[in-house]
Each structure stands twice: as C-alpha cells, then as structure tokens.
Amino acid sequence: MKKTVSLIAGSLILLTVLPSSIFAYTYSDNGKPFPDMNFTYYSTLSANYSGPASAAMTDWSRAVGATYTASNSTSKEIHFSDNDYGATGWNATTDHHHVQFSSYDYLDEVRANRHYMGSMSAVDREGVFGHELGHVFGLGHTTDPWTLMCNSLNGRVVVTPQLDDIQGVESLY
Amino acid sequence: MKNQKNKIFGSIIAVVLLIGIVFIINDNRKASHVHSSANELRQNNQILVNDTTNEPSSHTNDIIRYHGDLANNYNTVTELTYDSEAIYKVEVINSKSFEYEGVVFTVSTANVVENYKGDVISSFVNILETGGNYNNTEYVFEDSSVLKSGDKAVVYLKKYEGPIPEAQGAFVISGVYQGKFNIDEASGDLLVPAAVEQQELTEVRSLIDLNLE
Ligand SMILES: [Zn+2]
C-alpha cells in the first residue's frame, strides 16, 4: 500500500514537473497565412545572403516537406531582400501582406538588416532566415532557446527547425 | 496475488499519467490560443480579421505586423538596465511615421520628464521605432504599437547608428520594444510593458519593479 501511495504521489509530482510546455510553438497572425507549403519566392538578396537563405529553405524542405520555387517579381509569395537599416534592434523582419497588390493573394516580405547580419557567420544567417521562414508558415515566437522560433539569435542555440518547430508547422498544414 | 496487485496499480498509474498528459496538451493548446487572441485584443479595435481558410481576404488590411528576429533579447530588468545607454521617463510631443527601404518607422520627439540613467544633453529626445501609421495602415512590430503624441512612458534607450536620415541623433528602444513601459494614467500610473514574452519584463507594473524608485 505504501508503495502504491508513493508511486501515485511520484507520478503526480512527475505530472506537475513534466514540461509545462510540451509544445512551445505559438502562432501569429491568426494562424495559417498560406493555403499550402508550396511557396514561390523572389530573391533580391546579395551574394552573402542568398546562400544562407537557400540553406534555410532546404532545412525547412527536409523538415516538413515544404517546397520553395524561384519565381518572377510579380507572382511571388515570399520576397527576400537585404538592406542596411542601421541599429534598429532587429536582425531581420517578416511581414504578411494580403491581396491588395495584384495577381497573388499573399506576400511575405523577408528583410535582412545588413547592420547586424553583415558580421554574422553564414550559419547564423541561415538560422535567421530559417527563423523568418518559420514566421512565413505562420509560427509565432517561443522562449525556448532550443527552438528555431526563439525570438532572438543571442538566446537561440539552434539554426535549423527542431521538433517543436516542426510540430508547429505540421499542426497548421 | 501480490503480482496482480502490482499490475493493477501499475495500470492505474499509467492511466492517471495518460489523462494528465492529455490535459496538459489540451491546456497548452488553449493557452497559446488565448495568448494570441489576447495579443489581438491589444491592437485596439483594429483587429485584423483574417480567417485561417485560404480564400483571398477581401477586406483591407488595417494592421501589418512585423515579426522580427531581435539583435538583442532582454529577459530581465538587470540586463536591460546594464545594456541601455539612457533610461528616461518621457512624454511624447509628436510622432512622425515614414518609410525607409520598404519598412515603416516612426520618430517620436519626447520631453524628458525624468532621467534615471545617461546624460541629458537637452530636455528633448528623439526615439526611433519600427512600425507606425503610414498610408492608412498600421504597422506593428510584434505586439507593440509605436509611441504617439501624448503618451507617457519609461524607456530604455540606445543610440541609433545607421543611414535613416530622419533618425540621425535619435535613440532606439533597447530590444526594439522590450525596453518600453507605457504609463497608464487611468490606472494610477501603472506601467504597461511592451514585452509580452519576457517573464520578468512582462510582469513589471511599477517603477519599483524596474528598480527606479
Ligand atoms: Zn521572429
């Protein structure tokens, strides 16, 4: 009997200790912004940025089966660009636009800030683009440094999609 | 007999565990939904009603949200204080939004009401923020709306360096929005942290919490 009590007590304790967040992932912009995971993109990235952006797309393709097809400037779903915005506090941003433009329904602008990203390694750049592509899926931020959707490079310890990021995308698409 | 007892207890525990896990999962799902709808509510009345289906949205976009990867992330008041060049209580006199290389920014001119850290060269300070109202669209960085005329806030600042002409000599908020605490006069000067994900910062309610009083 004693054994049972301690077992039950033990499992109860385990329950409360068990990761208070089995899923860390969150959504942004009311969830799913794109109909599917087959994206078209247009890149105006300069040399040091296009490689890491491609690597990030490959990472997501491997992780969740997303496809990224290069497209022309008028019918793209994702536009990658880089500029020097100065010390704004962000490495990169992603924003969703809807219709209002023309033939396509959605457009996500992924913008790299050279002020910070200029001094990053290619791998860190890949991590930033991968993070932004997570936003393209509709993922929000986590505070778990072991997820790609952790909100800052200086806390994040991974540069590719992790299980939680993948689960987040898979529950949306 | 003893063996069977153990088996029964074993299965009871397994069931309890399973139920517990299911509950936690459900709870979490709910929690994240509640979280995002609360954030939505933060955006005043201009909620972007954009359903999750893939039909092209026919309504105009009132809010465009920037999701950013922060160059520096602050989780605690200590980190924020240590890394900021200036900490002021300010009252915003005017704000001007503009576009630079496709991104909407706002420069707000504010009265320095109180100086907690840093040299005040003049009684005014210019603050550059990402986002703002531009061409009838509100641009919001994560969940944080930019300062506007009449706003009072405690701000943790860093010098802006960079090419934006309107922002020469201006400061930026440390952590883009994390170092911004609006003062809500209606609630007896309670502080409203712009940070929604940083535990310690998100829980700040007063100057005492910021070690400024
Ligand atoms: Zn982000």
Image (cartoon, grey):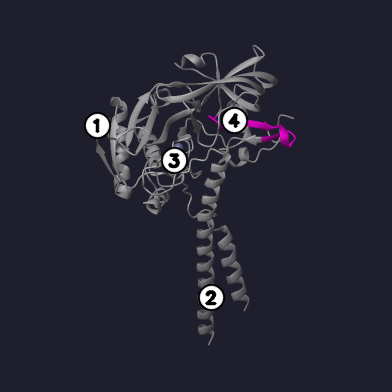
- Please name which of the two marks, 1 or 4, marks the residue nearer to the observer: 1
**Left or right, B150 with reference to B24:** right
**Left or right, B47 with reference to A113:** right
Q: Determine whether label 4 and label 2 are within 8 Å by CB.
A: no
Q: Mark 3 and mark 1: span between their CA atoms?
A: 34 Å
- Please name which of the two marks, 4 or 2, marks the residue nearer to the observer: 4
Q: Mark 2 and mark 1: span between their CA atoms?
A: 60 Å
The quarter of the picture where the N terminus of chain A appears is bottom right
Q: Position of residue B23 (x, y in %)?
A: 53, 63
Residue designated by label 4: B179
Q: Amino acid at mark 3?
A: Val
Same chain under badges 2 and 1? The reply is no
> Is the residue B55 above or below the residue B69 in the image?
below
Residue designated by label 2: B12
Same chain under badges 2 and 3? The reply is no
Q: Residues within 10 Å of mark 4 (few under 14, many from 20)?
A: many
Query: Nearest the camera: B57 or A11?
Result: B57
Badge 3: chain ID:
A
Residue designated by label 3: A157
Q: Position of residue A80 (x, y in %)?
A: 33, 31
Q: Mark 2 and mark 3: span between their CA atoms?
A: 39 Å
Q: Is residue B180 magenta?
A: yes
Q: Position of residue B60 (x, y in %)?
A: 44, 36
Residue designated by label 1: A72
- The span shown in magenta is B175-191
Q: Residues within 10 Å of mark 3 (few under 14, many from 20)?
A: some
Badge 2: chain ID:
B
